Image (spheres, rainbow, N blue to C red):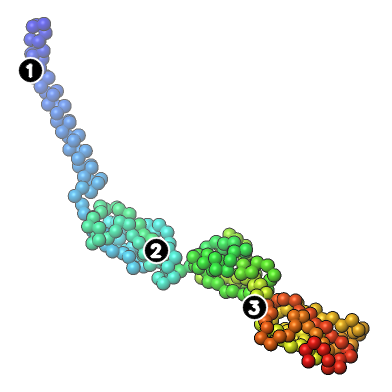
């Protein structure tokens, strides 16, 4: 064992070993130096480029400035902003150095979101929905609305149809924000009270016109002795249901029956 360590000592202290060890150390130092230099060059160590504030500028006007800084830019997407000129920068990432206090290195990509004036949204299905609910949905999606009422015995206050440019529009069709949608809303006319008119002495046609002026009614004229059109034209009302009572009212849309005779003599229910 003593002889082994003696030979090892002589080998370690030999010129050949020391020369090889020196070469290894030098090579190691060279590799470290090259690596550090490469990393500094690749990562631009110590380089600080302030990011300008591009918000509010048009994207076509910032290209030269970005290139002079050694940076790049990319438009991510467009945001619907009708109050801005299309292409106006709305957002940027990274934020301006004046705001974030952060700097970037050469080659960094500045990402923009720019404005646009038009945008398409899907048309919802509003048929069967209440008028108020349908209006809320349209407003939330950026659409305008117009209401047209249609008399109906059912679906009072509900949307019967949805129109765009005068034609039915299906759910899912994409149209521009700001478009006007016409909602056809059902209105049950039975419910508005009006005073019962006195139809006594009027012809059947005059009675029908009087009722029509007040609203929509189901009009049922009865004249058993009227056999011809001339008979019906000359027949006059002698009674009505509901009866005329001063101040009494009837709901529009209600049935209204009149009894008439062609031999009117001035007597009857409502003298």
Give the structural element (helix, strand or loop) at label 1.
loop
Distance Cα–Cα, label 1 vs label 2: 73 Å
User: What SS does tag 2 mark?
Assistant: strand
153 vs 216: above or below: above
Point out the frontmost of discs 3 and 1: 3
- Which residue in the rendered view is the most extreme toward the bottom? 266
Mark with earlier residue (3, 1) = 1
Instruction: Bin the neighbour count of mark 2 within 10 Å (Cα to Cα): few under 14, some 14-19, many 20 and up.
Output: many
The residue tagged 2 is 114
Displayed quadrant of residue 75: bottom left
Q: Position of residue 79 (x, y in %)?
A: 42, 63
Q: Is residue 150 visible?
A: no
Q: Tell me which numbered mark, 1 or 2, is placed earlier along the sequence.
A: 1
**Separation of disc 3 and disc 2 at Cα?**
53 Å
**Rendered image: mark on residue 108:** none
SS type, badge 3: loop
Q: Which residue is mark 3?
A: 192
Q: Residue at x 23, y 48 (%)?
A: 44
For label 1, the residue is: 13
Q: What residue is drawn where x is 64% and y is 69%?
A: 156
Quarter of the image with the N terminus is: top left
Q: Position of residue 42 (x, y in %)?
A: 25, 45
Place of residue 81 in the rendered image (x, y in percent of width and height, measured from the top left):
42, 68
């Amino acid at each position: 064992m003593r002889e082994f360590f003696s030979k090892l000592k002589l080998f370690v202290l030999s010129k050949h070993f020391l020369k090889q060890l020196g070469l290894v150390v030098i090579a190691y130092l060279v590799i470290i130096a090259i690596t550090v230099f490469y990393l500094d060059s690749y990562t631009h160590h110590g380089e600080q480029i302030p990011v300008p504030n591009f918000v509010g500028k048009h994207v076509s006007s910032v290209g030269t400035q970005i290139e002079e800084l050694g940076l790049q830019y990319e438009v991510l997407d467009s945001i619907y902003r009708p109050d801005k000129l299309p292409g106006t920068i709305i957002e940027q990432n990274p934020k301006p150095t004046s705001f974030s206090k952060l700097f970037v290195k050469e080659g960094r990509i500045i990402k923009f979101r720019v404005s646009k004036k038009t945008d398409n949204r899907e048309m919802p299905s509003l048929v069967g929905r209440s008028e108020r609910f349908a209006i809320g949905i349209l407003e939330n999606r950026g659409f305008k609305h117009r209401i047209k009422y249609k008399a109906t015995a059912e679906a009072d206050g509900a949307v019967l149809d949805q129109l765009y440019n005068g034609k039915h529009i299906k759910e899912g069709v994409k149209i521009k924000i700001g478009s006007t949608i016409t909602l056809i809303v059902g209105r049950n006319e039975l419910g508005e009270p009006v005073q019962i008119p006195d139809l006594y002495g009027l012809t059947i046609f005059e009675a029908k016109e009087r009722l029509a002026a007040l609203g929509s009614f189901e009009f049922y004229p009865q004249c058993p002795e009227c056999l011809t059109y001339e008979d019906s034209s000359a027949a006059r009302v002698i009674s009505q249901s509901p009866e005329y009572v001063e101040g009494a009212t009837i709901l529009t849309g209600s049935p209204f029956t009149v009894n008439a005779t062609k031999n009117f003599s001035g007597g009857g229910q409502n003298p």
